[in-house]
Structures are given as structure tokens and as C-alpha cells.
Image: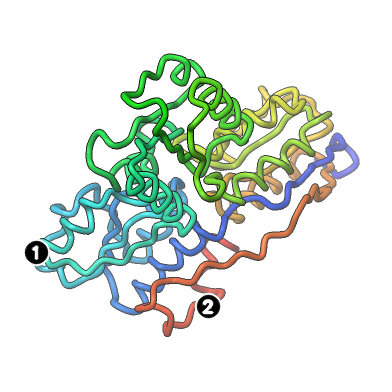
Amino acid sequence: MNIAAKPPLTIRLCGPRGFCAGVDRAIQIVVLALKSYGAPVYVRHEIVHNRYVVEGLEAKGAVFVEELDEIPAEHRAQPVVFSAHGVPKSVPEDAASRNLFYLDATCPLVSKVHKQAMRHNRLGRHVVLIGHAGHPEVIGTMGQLPEGSVSLIETIEDADSYQPDDPDNLGYVTQTTLSVDDTAGVITRLHERFPNLTAPAADSICYATTNRQEVVKQAAPGCDLFIIVGAPNSSNSKRLVEVALRAGAKKSILVQRAAELDWDEIGAISTLGLSAGASAPEVIVNEIIEAFRARFDARVELAETVQENEHFLVNRELRNIELTTADMAFVNG
């Protein structure tokens, strides 16, 4: 098919999109650990919620395990990395009991939520955590405090039915990757029922989640289709799909790779919105764009709201190791 025969397509490419500073830091920690200590480097759970990233790190020598007891005795001198989502306090305690050397890749913004929850608890408040049951970040946050110290609220309906032992002595925190709008509804309902509910010292929802949602809201009106690049187990990516639909996109889908695109279902479109969740690498965004260019006379417009300049330092043990562009090319291109 020649260029003239291709139907025109405008791609509204969102910025910011893709990796946030916390995800970038976590991946760098694994890459630098491999450079410093050699393979294997063990990683407890997915370092971030993206299969492409996990497979790329496996190709470099990372070994992903679900629990620490899977690490062979002969490799216990090798580092084990904890994922960006954070872990319960019991995990580093378990690592110490096994004489394992661990590197904590918990996102600093998730660590901030942990500290806020512990502060509520220290001041005698029962902690209300707004989040999704079973998400690793929620498990990690709840695991910072003694059992029974935290109540999980997922929806407005949960907020309506929640019956605390002491309604006047509550403090809340939120999962960092939730939809700003959805969280606001739950918080409002909790405040209506419990006027003395204490907010955290700072907003729990991270800047990257907010930024990616805001630019999707701006770009979505008039889009025939809005594609979010991300994994089905990525909370922030799934929220972006919902945000695009609410903001006016006719259709929105979550895609991990270009190979998943159903061209018959996509059909004839003239305006495409494109963004990526905080765990999705830029190489896949480029892959999606090239897939559309093969079928459309595509013109890319940047829809940008803010520029992100945040950078989180890696662990002290790794700061003297050089990180090159080539080291990160598998995700950055």
C-alpha cells in the first residue's frame, strides 16, 4: 500500500506518559545490581507491573521469585531486590533472618504513604486505607502495621457500610495509583460520615498518577479510540482507560504490545489518543505508533500538560556504578 492510499490519522501522543521516577529507579536498581554483583540478582515479585520489563531484566540475569525461600542456598550472597510497590515489614525481617543481602526498590512516594500510615498509628488513630484489595502496594502498606490496625476501603459503598470501633479517631491514607476523581468521592463520603477523620500530612496519590490522568483528560475529547499502553495488573494503567472514557473518548483499550491490536475491531478511525501507564516502557509506545503508521498516514501531535523532572536516587550501595544509555536501551530505545 502506498502512502497516498493510507487513510489519514492524527495521533494525540500524551506527555507525560510511561515511566515515572519511581519505576525508572526500580529498574535501574536491578540493572546496576547486575553490573555490580553479577548474575543472578533475585527480585521478589515483579519489579514493576510490566511483562516486557520483567523479560528484559531476565535476559540480563535477573531471577524473579515469589518468596525468599525460593533463593538457593548457594546464591544467598547475591542481592535480592524488593519491588517498587513496597513490601510488608515481615519481608526484610525474613531476609535478615536468612542472612540475605537485600536492596529495597520501594518507590519513595510509596514509602511516604507507609510513613503517613505509621504516623496515624503512632498518634493512636485507626488507619483507613483507600485502595484495591490484593494489590502489592496495598499489601505492603497494610503490612507496615500490626494486624487489625488498618481497614481497607475500596468503594463509596464500602465507605457507606464501614463501622469503625472509634469513629472519632480515624486517619486515612490512599494507594498512590488510584484515580484522583474516584478517590475524592470515597474521601468525601468518609468525611461526611466521620467529620473528625484526619487526612495524611500530604496527598498520597503520586504526582505521576495525577499528571498522566490530567493529560489524558485533555486529549480524550474527540478521540475515536484511546490506547493506554500497560499491563492488565497495572492499577494506574487501568485507571487511565477509565479516565479516557469519562473524558470523552469513544472507546478506550489497554494494550501490552502492538501484536495485541485487533485491526478489524479498530476499523476506520481519524483521531487516536495514546498514552502509557507508569510501568510501560517507551519502546512499546514507539512500537504502537509504527504499527499505526504502517496502516495509516499518521501525524503525531504532542498533547502535553507538564514536564516531569523528578529523579530519585538509587541505593547508596549502587551510586558509584555507571549507568549508561546502552544499559537502559531495552526499555528506553
In primary-sequence order, the first of circles 2 and 1 is 1
**In the displayed structure image, the side of residue 299 where residue 128 appears, left or right:** left
Kindly identify the residue that appears in the image at 60 percent across and 55 percent down: 283
Give residue 209's position: percent from left, percent from top. 60, 45
Q: Residue at x 31, y 24 (%)?
A: 165
- The CA span between labels 2 and 1 is 32 Å
> Label 2's element?
loop
Identify the amino acid type marked 1.
Ala
Q: Position of residue 62 (x, y in %)?
A: 32, 62
Q: Which residue is mark 1?
A: 73
* Left-right relation of 202 to 107: right
Q: Residue 261 appears at what percent x and percent y?
A: 61, 33
Check the image and report above or below for 117 versus 41. above
Farthest right residue in view: 4
Image side of residue 293 versus residue 320, left or right: right
Give the residue number, with chain letter if any, for mark 2.
324
